[in-house]
Structure formats: structure tokens, C-alpha cells
Amino acid sequence: MRAVDIIIKKRDRKEMTREEIEFFVRGIVNGEIPDYQVSAWAMAVLLNGMSDQETSDLTLAMAYSGEVLDLSGIVPMEVDKHSTGGVGDKTTLVVEPLVSACGLPVGKMSGRGLGFTGGTLDKIESIPGMRTNLTQEEFKRLLRDEGLVLAGQSGDLAPADGKLYALRDVTGTVQSIPLIASSVMSKKIAGGAQGIVLDVKVGSGAFMKNLEEARQLSRLMVTIGTLSGRKVVALLSDMNQPLGRAVGNALELVEAIDTLKGRGTADFTEHCLVVASHMLLIGKKAQNLDAARKMAEAALADGSGFEKLKQLVKNQGGDAAYVDDCALFPPAPIIRGVQSPQKGYLSRVDALEIGEASVNMGAGRNKKEDTIDHRVGIIVHHKVGDLVHTGDELFTIHARDESSWQMAANSVLSACRWQEQPCEPLPLFYEVIKQK
């Protein structure tokens, strides 16, 4: 078997066998297939696509290209949640404690932010002492004994995905939907997930810019779940404007804490309850979605979700005093509002522009090696559909110096559009895609 023959086969729109895919993935990991051949193959996949079976075979080959975490002896069923990323998406920090408080153990492996897409690890590491670099033994112990753990992805899990993604990033093949789907699902399977709730973002601040692309990706990931023996449900949610109010690491963590204390905004709280309900249903903690919703609401109302987050922080070395008293988080040097220059109904509060402004202030990374400033970010006071008057505060910018505040102020105003006639708020979710 030769790599060039597999490249030619995909170039000619023929279907690869499982054996050919496994051979190619092994060659990626051990370096026997050079980068230029992997890149040629990825371009052929981008142009010609893959069948559902090919994509499933690729997913499993990548998942088993390194260590696979076996959690079957630790918990009855491991349920994970994955977001395709967005601006202000701190959902994990609320949903995972709520679900754990309902008796469903959650072991979450998360990533760091790159570009305008924030990372859960960066947010929770705003707390001094918080450890997310855990050994597999620590991960399993916390999952078994505490029912909640949040850690970084081990480099030993799905190494083929890391190598392939690095090449896709520099060869213009990131947009391939089969390669996106196999990348996401391989990491979840390698991490031991038996049930997966996918929060697939749609809009300007998301990877999938339109609903049809998001549907295609979601259906494919749900199909991969079926073919690989996993339970998967995909929720298509809006990312044309930031999720919640806060954009920026410590600011988002504070919003998540406030939400678990029952002080969250109605839209963000609703988003979290919907995701939590689907996790509880897929994890067999409830017979139907309504019952799951009641469980999640109860964990929010009685404070048990909040207590789970506090315990998570303690278990992983963080100073839980910051969870009790958010005033302990160090403020940015400059905190100042941006006012509306006119009266009207907001018809646009663009997530991408606001996310990029936050990154340029230091809240995110343009390159993996960049450092971040946990203090800086943006608070969004109004959303699409709101009536604002001249002089109303639209945003509060937390900046490290005057020049970055001014840059961000200009950016967030350019992200907004006003109109004279009322307009509808944006939906939280567009649809749910389930296994048949």
C-alpha cells in the first residue's frame, strides 16, 4: 500500500477503504508519510468530499492513533459537551456543574482560545492556583470521587488530529466539513465520551457562517456517532452576537459564577439550561427533556450547581474564595463605558468584530504562544432588538491602557447598526439534530 495511490484514489473521487484510511493515519503519526503528501490528500478531501463511512473510519482511526481513555470502570456513562467555539461562550462553566449536581458525572477536556474563539481553560485559570494540567490518574480519580473535573487535552490523545490540523491550517483546507467533523469527534471518542452534546454555533462569530453549513456539519457528526456506537445530539445555536454579556476571560468567569448564583441574564441562563437538559437526557438521568429541564432548574435554584463549581476549583488547587467573592479578581487599569451615538433599535451587534477587538486588547491569542491578559475584555449591555437612546451605555470596556481602550471603543461601535423600526431579537437556537 502506498500513500500516493490513496491520494490518487481520492483525487479521482473514489471511496477509500477502512484499511487505506488506517494506513494513511498511521503514516501521519509516525512520520512515514511526508507533509506534502498529507497536504495533497487533505486538498483532495476538501475538493471531493468523503462519504459518511469514510468520515467515520477516519474519525476512529484518528481517535485510536494514540491513547484512548477508558472510563467504563470509572462511571456508568461518560457524557461530554462540545462547542464549536464563539464569542463570549462560557457555557461549559455553568452547564458542567449543573449536570454534575444532578448526579451525572462529567469529565471535561477543554482547549485554550485561539483568535476570537475563547478557551474554557483560559477562563477558569483566571483563578489563582487553578490546575488544569492533570495526569490521567488525577482525571479519573476526580471523576470517580467528585463527579466533576475540567482538564486540558492530553497530547497523547488523538495525536493524528493535531498533526493533520497543523497542516490544514497552513494549506487552506481547514474548511473541509468531513475533516472538521472527524477532528471534533476523534478527540471526544479518545477522551472516553459515550454520549456527546454538540453546541454548533452559527453566524458571524462562528466557524460555520450559515445555517446550511452548520446543518451539514451537525448531521455528519451525529452520523459518525451512530456509526461509532456513541449517542450524539447537535444543537444549532446563534453566534451573530456575543453569547451572554461578557467577552474576556475573568469577565466571562464572573458571569458564569453570577449565573450559577441565579443572577444571570435570561438569555444566557436559558442557553445553559437547554444544553444541560440535553446532557441529562442523553446520560439517562431523565426520561424526557421536560424532566431533564426540571432537574437542571432545581440545581440552579437550590445552589447545588454553584457549590459544584466551587468544589471543582478547590479540587484542582484553585482559590475558591474568588468564586465566593468575585471582587477579588484584579480589575483592568481602565474601565470605561461606550455610549450610543444615536437613538434606534439595534439591528446588529456583530460577534466577530467584538471578539476581534477583545483579542486585540490582549484577551485572546493570535498565535498559540501568545500570552493573555485575564483582566481585559468587553461587557455588552444591549443586544439585537433592544431600543437604545442617545447616550445610553452600550458597552463597558476593561482595558490595560488608553490606546487599547480607544481601539476597542471604535471597534465595538462599528459592530453596531441602528434602525428606526423595531426588529426581532435573535433566536438562541435554530434547531436540534438527533440520531434516527
Image: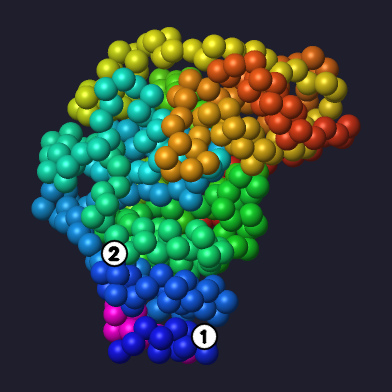
- The image quarter in which residue 142 lies: top left
Q: Earlier in the sequence, mark 1 or mark 2?
A: 1
Name the residue nearer the viewer: 38 or 179.
Answer: 38
Residue 111 on image: x %, y %: 38, 44
Residue at screen point 48% across, 76% down: 40
Q: Is residue 366 above or below residue 23?
A: above
Name the residue nearer the viewer: 203 or 104.
Answer: 203
Q: Which residue is mark 1?
A: 11
Is residue 319 shown left or right of residue 355?
left
Residue at screen point 34% across, 37% down: 96
Residue 274 on image: x %, y %: 46, 42
Disc 1 marks which amino acid? Arg
Q: Which numbered tag is attached to residue 109?
A: none
Residue 15 colored magenta? yes
Magenta segment main secondary structure = helix
Q: Which residue is mark 2?
A: 63
Q: Which region shows up in magenta?
A: 14-23
Looking at the image, can residue 217 be seen? no
Residue at screen point 45% across, 48% down: 83
Disc 2 secondary structure class: helix
| Eye-nearest disc, 1 or 2 | 1
